[in-house]
Amino acid sequence: MSVYLNQVKAIVWKDFVTELKTRELFSSMFVFALLVMLIFIFSINLSIVSANEVGPGVLWVAILFAGTLGLNRSFMLEKENGCLQGMMLAPVDRSAIFFGKMLSNLAFLLIMETFLLPVFMIFFNVDLVSHLGPLVGVILMGTLGFSALGTLLSSLSSNLKTREIMLPILLYPLMVPVAIGAVRLTGQILDGKSLADMMNWVGLILCFDIIFISASIMTIDHILEE
Amino acid sequence: MESSITFQFLMTEPNLPLDSSPAIQVQGIRKHFGHLEALRGIDFELKKGDFLSLFGPNGAGKTTLIRILSALTRPSSGIARVAGYDVIEADPNMRREIGVISHASFLYADLSPLENIRFYATLYGVEQAEERAIEVIEEVGLKARLHDRVRTFSRGMLQRLSIARAIVHNPSILFLDEPYTGLDHHASGILKEQLQALHTDQRTILMTTHDFSRGLEMCDRVAIMARGKLALWESADQIDPADFERLYLETVEQAQRG
């Protein structure tokens, strides 16, 4: 078990060191998310619609779109110089490769979201600080599902010529339940409701998180083998 | 600077399997890609410490064979055992016994040699990964570039670092897929010295190459593949290097006609 954990840790560490040296992933994801938010803020008249109603949708669209950029890059890094094959040659359980990549994708997304939330708060003039606890919970749940499914599908699409197109085409339809749940929960949290009042949405997101992670563990072996 | 490098692979004993089974055993291996038959029944055996040079034109199936033997691809039919393990089962112990050097380096361009080799050492469960990584990087003469980004390396240096990556876990079997591709004369000479050191170390080596002189100078066995089959299998001492080009062309031509 400790060997397995060391392997997962090594994959996460390798992705972090690469990102610290290149700063490609974070900068591209954050700038893209910022641009998406800016486009929405100029196209929405917040004196007519409530920020609590449209804001959560805009936030999650920005997270999902920017996250897709990061996911595309994630397995491209492994394809360069045949590194994925190098990992596959090692006595590494394929699920360790999946968890390593998923955890680094999750961490990069969470870091990006940490910087994005203050921007969202300023642009939409909403108070996130008083709802920070439940909001962080929802963001964690939504981002976990997105990372799990995104990592699986980016490993699948990385073998395709049209990988940049295929990833969003495969990912977004399957992400719909988690995205809807996350938007609804975020909206209701901003309206001052507690998570305990919305357990059906929490349950839905958690169920899909479990489904995505389980499906990934079951299929990653076949996906990584060409 | 590079010519003064001394190779000390003899200092590390490979993880030789304890049983007396052949290092590599291949029986009736076939591989289909849709309608294309890349391998059409390959049979051979290599003893521990053997060095096989495998020649053949592009598309003969050499890389597919190495991918099967290193458990990256499953054969469509047939049996292949590496270090006594069935490649289809891809036992982790089998993976610990093999190292692969290919024309792709399997190295992360933005990481340093130390970060790359330490990463692979950890994946292979090598104890004291950092110390071992430094040791093998020193063996391939790249200690002075320990912390530089791999992206800045020449093709020859990348190939030497690939050797460090492939031997960091001390494998008993090495698969080399066209290791001389893209190397200049000087870098080829360095790679040759390193391969010689690895061979002297009693590792079983299977190398595919298009370079006749490099392929023939170290091997114990010579094979020529054409159209997915072994068209020639000979002991190296039965081969006249001066006449090998004619033998190669005739063998390939005959195989392609058949």
Image (spheres, coloured by chain):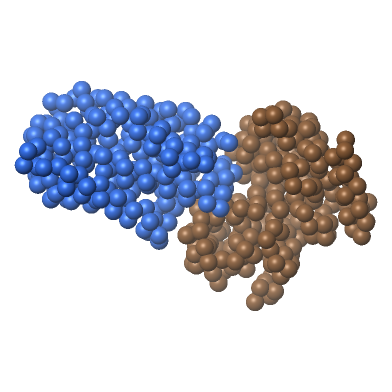
Chain colours: A blue, B brown
Residue A217: x %, y % from top left: 45, 31
Residue B89: x %, y % from top left: 63, 31
Where's the C terminus of chain A, which quadrant? top right
Residue in the foreground of this view, choosing between A156 and B13: A156
Q: Residue at image x 57%, y 35%? A: A225
Q: Residue at image x 69%, y 29%? A: B35
Residue in the foreground of this view, choosing between A201 and B44: A201
Instruction: Say if residue A172 shows up in the picture.
Output: yes
Residue A180: x %, y % from top left: 24, 29
Left or right relative to B124: residue B20: right
Return the residue found at the far left.
Answer: A47
Residue B250: x %, y % from top left: 91, 47
Residue in the foreground of this view, choosing between B64 and A140: B64
Instruction: Say if residue B118 shows up in the picture.
Output: no
The number of discs equals 0
Q: Residue at image x 37%, y 53%? A: A25
Task: Determine which quarter of the picture holds residue B155.
Answer: bottom right
Left or right relative to B130: residue A36: left
Residue in the foreground of this view, choosing between B149 and B35: B35
